[in-house]
DNA sequence: TCATTATTTCCAGAACTTTCGAAATGTTAG
DNA sequence: CTAACATTTCGAAAGTTCTGGAAATAATGA
C-alpha cells in the first residue's frame, strides 16, 4: 500500500457520515446492503449518500455490485486490513513487537488476546 | 472510544505529512523524537511541523514530554489500538469472526497469523 | 543579562470538502 | 412505451484545512 492510498482511505473514513456508513457495512458482512437501505438506516438523503458511497468506493474501502435496480455496497475487508497493516508497520523498530504492538485488529471481538502496550 | 474521537483521529492521520510523522514515531518507539529531529528527518519547516504535531497530539495520537529545551513526541500506542478496534468492531455481525476479520493489526510484523478474508 | 537555539502562535490567502436542490441516468414492471 | 423507483451527477454556497512568513514564547549557557 502506497502512502497516498493510505491518506485517501483515511480521509474517506475521517467524516462522521462515512465512518458510520463504513462501520455499518463492516458489521453487515460480505453480502452488503443496497444504497437505499443504508440511507434508510442512517437517515441520509440519497444524493448525499451517493456522494459518500462514491468517496468510500474510490478509496477502495467499499465494493459495489449491481443487482437489478439495486446497488449493493459491501466493506472491502482486504483494504481495511492493508490500511491497518500500513499504520502499524515496523512498530517500535521491529524490536519486542510482542509487547509493543497490539494484537488488536480484533481486540474488541476477540478479547482473549488482549494487548500489552508501551506508553 | 466515541465516534467523534475516531473521526478526529482519522482526520489527523489523513494528511500526508502527518501520516509520515506518525509512522516515523510508531517505528521509533516509546522514547520518541524531539520536534527538531522530526523536522530534520522529514524536511518540514518548524511552524508547519508544529501545526501538524499539535493536530496529532490533540487527536490523542501523540504524547509530548519536555526535556530541557527539547520536546519529545512519541506515538500513543493505546490510542492507535483503540482506533483500530473501533474500525473493526462487530465485524460481520460477530459471526465467524475467525475467518472474517484479519488478525491484522500486526500482519506486517507477525506473519504467522495471517488472515483469511471474505471478499 | 544577553545571545542562541527550540518550538509555538498568529495571520491571511489558496485549496479543498460537505451539503442539498434540481436534473439526469438507469432498471424494471405493467 | 410509460410510469415508477433507485441511484448518480451537477452546481453553488458555506465551512474547513493547509501553508509559510513574521513575531512570540521558552529554556539554556556564557
Image (cartoon, coloured by chain):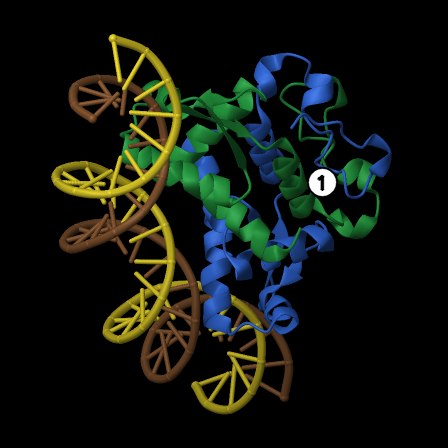
Chain colours: A blue, B green, C brown, D yellow
Tally of numbered discs: 1
Picture quarter containing residue A118?
Answer: top right
Give the vertical position of B13 relative to A55 (above or below): above
x 72%, y 34%: residue: A104
Work out whether residue A10 can be spotted: no
Residue under numbered circle 1: B118
Which of D21/B8 is in front? D21
Give the vertical position of B80 relative to A32 (above or below): above
x 54%, y 38%: residue: B61
- Residue A58: x percent and y percent? 46, 48
Q: Residues within 10 Å of mark 1 (few under 14, many from 20)?
A: some
Which of A81/B19 is in front? B19
Tell me which chain the residue with mark 1 is part of.
B
x 64%, y 12%: residue: A95
At mark 1, the secondary structure is loop
- Residue A10: x percent and y percent? 49, 43
- Residue A87: x percent and y percent? 55, 31
x 80%, y 32%: residue: A114
Which of C11/A83 is in front? C11
Quadrant (top left, top right, bottom left, bottom right) of the C terminus of chain B = top right
Which of A93/A52 is in front? A93
**Image position of A31 (left or right of B12):** right
Amino acid at each position: 500500500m502506497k502512502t497516498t492510498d493510505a491518506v485517501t482511505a483515511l480521509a474517506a473514513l475521517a467524516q462522521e457520515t462515512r465512518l458510520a456508513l463504513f462501520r455499518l457495512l463492516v458489521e453487515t458482512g460480505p453480502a452488503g446492503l443496497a444504497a437505499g437501505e443504508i440511507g434508510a438506516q442512517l437517515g441520509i438523503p440519497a444524493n448525499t449518500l451517493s456522494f459518500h458511497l462514491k468517496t468510500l468506493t474510490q478509496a477502495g474501502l467499499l465494493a459495489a455490485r449491481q443487482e437489478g435496480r439495486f446497488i449493493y455496497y459491501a466493506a472491502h475487508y482486504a483494504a481495511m486490513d492493508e490500511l491497518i497493516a500500513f499504520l502499524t508497520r515496523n512498530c517500535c523498530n521491529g524490536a519486542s513487537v510482542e509487547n509493543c504492538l497490539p494484537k488488536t485488529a480484533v481486540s474488541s471481538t476477540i478479547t482473549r488476546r488482549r494487548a500489552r502496550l508501551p506508553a
